[in-house]
Amino acid sequence: MSEYQTFEHDVLVIGAGGAGLRAAIEASAAGVSVGLVCKSLLGKAHTVMAEGGMAAAMANVDDRDNWKVHFSDTMRGGQYVNNWRMAELHAKEAPDRVRELEAWGAVFDRTKDGKILQRNFGGHRYPRLAHVGDRTGLELIRTLQDHGIHQGIEVYMEVTVIALLKDGERVVGAFAYEREHGRFRIFKAKAVILATGGIGRAYKITSNSWEGTGDGHSLAYDAGAELIDMEFIQFHPTGMVYPPSVRGILVTEGVRGEGGVLKNSEGTRFMFDDIPDNYKDQTADTPEEGWRYTQGDKNARRPPELLTRDHVARCIRREVKAGRGSPHGGVYLDIAWIKEKLPNAAEHIKKKLPSMYHQFKQLADLDITTTPMEVGPTTHYIMGGIRVDGDTQASTLPGLFAAGECAAGINGANRLGGNSLSDLLVFGKRAGEYAAKFALENNFGTFDNAQIEERARWALEAFDRESGENPFAIQNDLQEMMQDLVGIVRVEEEMQQALEGIKDLRERREKISLTGNIDFNPSWHTALDLHNLLNVSEAITLAAIERKESRGGQFRDDFPSKVAEFGKVNFIIKKGAGGQMEIRSERIPEMPEELKQIIEEMG
């Protein structure tokens, strides 16, 4: 063990996005030593791609908003399979976390009277998203980094964790390598927080950057922790579709929040064709007049483009399959039409959506102030992840905590836009707080040399093969298969086919051959990432097969309706004693009467 450089921290945070940074800040504030490991460079976290805003019931724009409405919206969006305790805590604490961020230097857009401005977003009853133009995630990361550097946090950049270290059932550290030269590193810790983000790179078309390979999900699973809700994948309705080099890059929901409308190739605003009955105003003369967010509230009308993301994504897919798509396989998102109502529309768009204006101008040579954008669904977010306690963010393994996208519970079957950024703040803080508490109450654990050497051998074995598979080819085949067989619309026959495909890909991964050495070797990085991608792909597919209904981010063409019994259970995945993936269902704990009453009152 002595040949590997070793570092010691009371709390080790793996992942330096919004959740990881907020957790590190909170743990450091408790007076413990904190190490922060990030796979890429500090500041390049996927959080910066969250553009529209952070949801918090601050009531700055509409004074009818409060935590109860936010809680109700989140539960309804999640189709009531959410962890209701997490949804409650999130709704209650999000406003304080946003104000705290403001106190730390975040520069938000403002109302005329100087309050933080909030915008409409899909699934939210009232304007609720505190934002900074369409660069909210970037401002969040900037603020947390600026605040965090004064806390004495030790940052390890371009370091990838490949295994958690255990003392019995307790997690006591991590085994990693630094990406530049491939040297292994050991991190000893009293508590470990996983904040590694999503799994988007399991799919061909995704808004996620290269880091999104399900590392935290897989690390926790391999260590013996439980995963939950893995069947629920959010396909964001609007990603770029052209040119091919940028396909999947996110087009923020803020475009629709600022008045952007969706049209097919015939110029029809097709979302009016598929409004759920309970969202319609049956007394209205026209759909444009009549559509509103919730029946009985004529002051809360929303355009149908702001229905939940799963619904909008399926409607876009329907238009494309029916032959009414754009030339490059998407539909049109038009914000330029507001020039009919605003004389200074071009400047308004550039002010409200600066990133989108520059993104399309630079990547597609298109001016969104004059021309509709081509957009289509893109794999964006996983609602499922590591099972955690709602209050403490503790996983099912002692010493292991999780927060952000790699943790699960708050979103249930579908996440409302904007809930992710406030989720990072609320539960990043809680993870840091309780991990520090655990560290103060426990000593460093011990682990044997065998754990280290076994994982080191596993990581390097492909260099010993003289001929074999190319890791990039395997990754490409996995992405194609998941996109085609476990995508927006699913059927059992195709998913069973995917399970067999994953089994074959695992066998192919065991035959990977790598040339050169570990310095500057992207093939080696991809080979290691593949293990994580295969784990999360199998978990997604297995859970999607077991949930024989359509709910939120899971749409089954062979079971197109909700089934009441499935609304009472979550599916749990854990590594079996023989190393195989096991799945079981577990009933959702009964919601307290006071929370049930809130949902009933909110309709």
Image: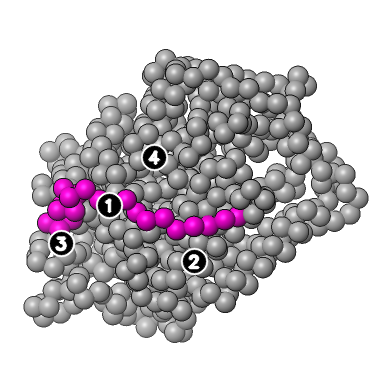
Q: Element under label 1?
A: loop
Q: Element under label 4?
A: loop
Looking at the image, tell me whether mark 4 or mark 1 is earlier in sequence order.
4
Marks 1 & 3, CB-CB < 8 Å contact: no
How far apart are the alpha carbons under marks 2 and 1? 22 Å
Residue at point 19%, 64% (across, down): 293
Quarter of the picture holding the C terminus: bottom left
Side (left or right) of 330 relative to 297? right
Q: Is residue 96 magenta?
A: no
Res. 603 mark? 3
Of tags 4 and 3, the one toward the viewer is 4
- Amino acid on which disc 3 is placed: Gly
Of 152 and 68, the residue lying toward us: 68
Magenta residues, start to end: 581-601
Residue holding disc 1: 590
Looking at the image, tell me whether mark 1 or mark 3 is earlier in sequence order.
1
- Amino acid on which disc 1 is placed: Glu
Res. 546 mark? 2
Q: Quadrant of residue 235?
A: bottom left
List x then y, in percent, for residue 384. Answer: 45, 53
How far apart are the alpha carbons under marks 4 and 1? 15 Å
Q: Element under label 3?
A: loop
